[in-house]
Amino acid sequence: MHSELVISAIVATAKNRVIGDGHSLLWKISEDFRRLKEITMGCPLIMGRKTWDSLGRPLPGRANIVLTRKTKWAEEGAIKATSIEEALELAKNWLNHFGETKKEIFIFGGMEVYKVGIHFCNFIYLTEVDVKPLSKFKFPKIDKDEWKIISKSEQKISEDDLKYKFITYQRVK
Ligand SMILES: NC(=O)c1ccc[n+]([C@@H]2O[C@H](COP(=O)([O-])OP(=O)(O)OC[C@H]3O[C@@H](n4cnc5c(N)ncnc54)[C@H](OP(=O)(O)O)[C@@H]3O)[C@@H](O)[C@H]2O)c1
């Protein structure tokens, strides 16, 4: 638990950094969904409009801050932002009003939002799935000079026999 404000990315990637096919994820790992819920509960999520569409509903117990360039966009349960800076401001304000002890903002994807959001992150919660699908939708490269691993789970096996691991990175520079 952090008492200071922390910005973190949370993501599940294949071994080749693929995060999805542009519409949805390419695997279903229920332990990963449970963990994602546990880690993010009570906190603001910053996501792209396409990820919002793929969820189909706001994730309960969390601020759903949605990045879009569409000026007239509005959907129930979403807090609209037009830039990553605005999204982070909205997330901080939300935490000041509604946040409990954990002051953490999550960069929630997809590819476009990870690309602009990663620069603000101190931590990455990565679920690494042992598959190598073809897709252009990828998480940015995690540069070893910029990030160190601070925890790594043992290998786990999903209901669908997929191997996966939880890895946490902390920014070093
Ligand atoms: N594996 C994972 O952990 C994970 C997590 C999340 C998502 N995903 C996957 O990621 C894929 C979607 O990724 P994506 O890159 O296509 O979409 P995305 O990042 O979810 O959304 C892109 C949209 O966000 C808005 N946007 C992006 N950058 C912006 C900026 N700087 N300022 C204002 N608005 C901005 C634009 O919305 P408008 O078009 O409305 O202007 C853009 O079209 C899906 O396959 C999804 O399943 C995977």
Image (cartoon, rainbow, N blue to C red):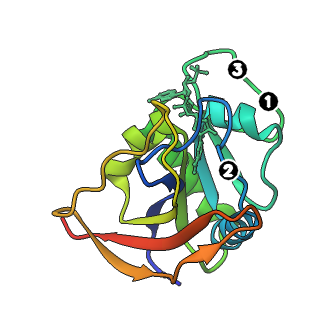
Residue count near mark 2 (Cα–Cα under 10 Å), binned few <14, some 14–19, many ≥20: some
Q: Residue at x 83, y 41 (%)?
A: 57
Q: Is mark 3 within 8 Å of ligand 1?
A: yes
Marks 3 & 2, CB-CB < 8 Å contact: no
Marks 3 & 1, CB-CB < 8 Å contact: yes
Q: Tag 1: residue type?
A: Glu
Q: Is residue 160 above or below residue 55?
A: below
Quarter of the image where one finds residue 138: top left
Q: Residue at x 49, y 32 (%)?
A: 135
The residue beneath circle 1 is 75
Q: Residue at x 42, y 48 (%)?
A: 17
Q: Earlier in the sequence, mark 3 or mark 2?
A: 2
Q: Earlier in the sequence, mark 2 or mark 1?
A: 2
Return the residue nearer the eye: 43 or 38.
38
The answer to whether 14 appears left or right of 148 in the picture is right
Return the residue nearer the eye: 134 or 47.
134
The residue beneath circle 3 is 73
The answer to whether 155 appears left or right of 139 in the picture is right
